[in-house]
Image (cartoon, rainbow, N blue to C red):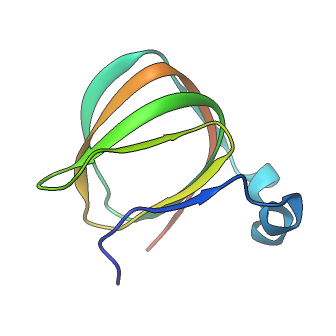
Amino acid sequence: MSDEIKIEKQPPEQRLASLGVRSWPIWTKEKSEFPWSYDASETCYFLEGDVTVTPEGGEPMRVGKGDLVTFPKGMRCTWKVALPVRKHYHFED
């Protein structure tokens, strides 16, 4: 298991289709800052937004519109939402 955030910038539609991204539920969040921890691995595709995610003890990472991002199970972090988020998401153990 990796403990790092994986970011794919602007993945092709074929990649998104192979994962079934468009059928995943959508989550939205207004401009805010909050702590978060992952009980399962999450893969998400950002339709809108600009977020800085800072893992506990790690470097801040910026993600947003067009990014396919995987957050590892067990990660604790802080989300700082600069532009409102709209994303497809999927959890796996």
The vertical placement of 29 against 36, above or below, is above
Q: Residue at x 51, y 29 (%)?
A: 50
Looking at the image, residue 69 sits to the left or right of residue 38; the answer is right
Q: Quadrant of residue 13?
A: bottom right
Residue 24 horizontal/vertical position (percent): 71, 52
For the residue pair 10 and 22, the one nearer the viewer reads as 10
Q: Residue furthest top?
A: 31
Residue 89 horizontal/vertical position (percent): 60, 50
For the residue pair 67 and 31, the one nearer the viewer reads as 67
Q: Quadrant of residue 16?
A: bottom right
Looking at the image, residue 68 sits to the left or right of residue 29; the answer is right
How many numbered circles are shown? 0
The vertical placement of 60 against 4, above or below, is above
Residue 78 horizontal/vertical position (percent): 24, 38
Residue 72 horizontal/vertical position (percent): 37, 67
Q: Quadrant of the C terminus?
A: bottom left
The vertical placement of 45 against 51, above or below, is below
Q: Residue at x 80, y 68 (%)?
A: 15
Q: Residue furthest left?
A: 57
Q: Residue furthest bottom?
A: 1
Q: Quadrant of the N terminus?
A: bottom left
Q: Quadrant of residue 26?
A: top right
